[in-house]
Image (cartoon, rainbow, N blue to C red):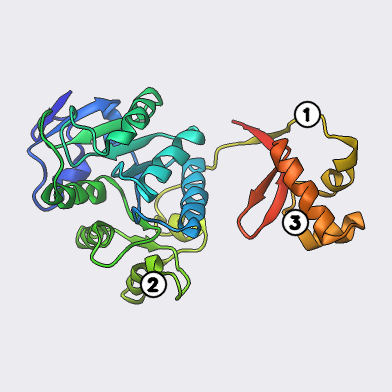
Amino acid sequence: MIIEYYDKLYPESLRKIDKPPSRLYVLGDYKILNQMGIAVIGSRTNTQYGENMCKRFTKNLVEYNLNIISGLAVGIDGIAHKTCLQNSGKTIAVLPSGLENIYPNKHKELVKEIINSGGAIVTEYEANVKADSKKFLERNRIVAGLGVGTLVIEAGNRSGTSVTAKLTSMQGKPVFCIPSSLENNKGKITNELIKKGANLTTDINDILSCYPDIKFYKKKIVKKEVIIDIPQELLNVYKTINDNPKNVNEIAKESNLSISEVNYKITLLQINNAIIELPGQKYVRRTDEIE
């Protein structure tokens, strides 16, 4: 589908940016372009911390019915799109190329999943145009423009991520940054952005509170415990683990076992897909979530 600038279907948010695209080429549900979403961006070479934070905050945003906007790149972009889909959300991928030259090529299947899940793929370039460095930078203004704000997970020096954050600010929208360790090179730019006025973000409410005129409603999630046949020798540890995250020391104390025994049994329980490891090496039982 092609949407011209003067078409009534053209996203209102993009009309307000500097150098708005004269036309958009769209695959999927074009209506999503005019719905409320947050851009989630970050490094192509993210750390494990960055991946964990991206999954946590993307899941939280989807729970509050916010669409996820990103650039389909490897790293944080791809993690954001995939996490959104895994949590029954809708996502928009903005390409630095034409629709016949999906970039990166490895995300062709992801593109199909996005479309089939009610999301959209959008670009300002004709079908056969290939990606290049100039188009990556041009793409970033659309990523920033479609969202009501931008969440930065991790960013390298002189990266496209930092450019998108700057464009978001220039468009008068809030930039949210997750702080990082001083020893994490990928967290240097996010920490610098916070020092320059970006919103320090450690909780989903740090994002939602920036939109006082909007009433957010969290999806009702029912957790259904998965029935799993637990081997007898693992039951003592399994029964100790519940919905409250616990670390190995806590589990060992409650089950009256040594740390080494608990670690061994936790590994077997993970192999059996009975428990899930959370950030900080804490564990909970696996459950199915139903809306």
Quadrant of the drawing holding the C terminus: top right
Q: Position of residue 69 (x, y in %)?
A: 33, 43
Quadrant of the drawing holding the N terminus: top left
| Circle 1 residues within 10 Å: few <14, some 14–19, many ≥20 | few
Q: Quadrant of residue 268?
A: top right
Q: Position of residue 141 (x, y in %)?
A: 19, 51
The answer to whether residue 15 of the structure is visible from this angle is yes
Looking at the rendered structure, the kind of residue marked 1 is Ile
Residue where numbered disc 1 is placed: 227
SS assignment at label 2: helix
N-terminal of the pair, mark 3 or mark 1, is: 1
Q: Position of residue 112 (x, y in %)?
A: 34, 25
N-terminal of the pair, mark 2 or mark 1, is: 2
Residue where numbered disc 3 is placed: 246
Looking at the rendered structure, the kind of residue marked 2 is Asn
Above or below residue 268? Residue 263 is below
Residue where numbered disc 2 is placed: 191
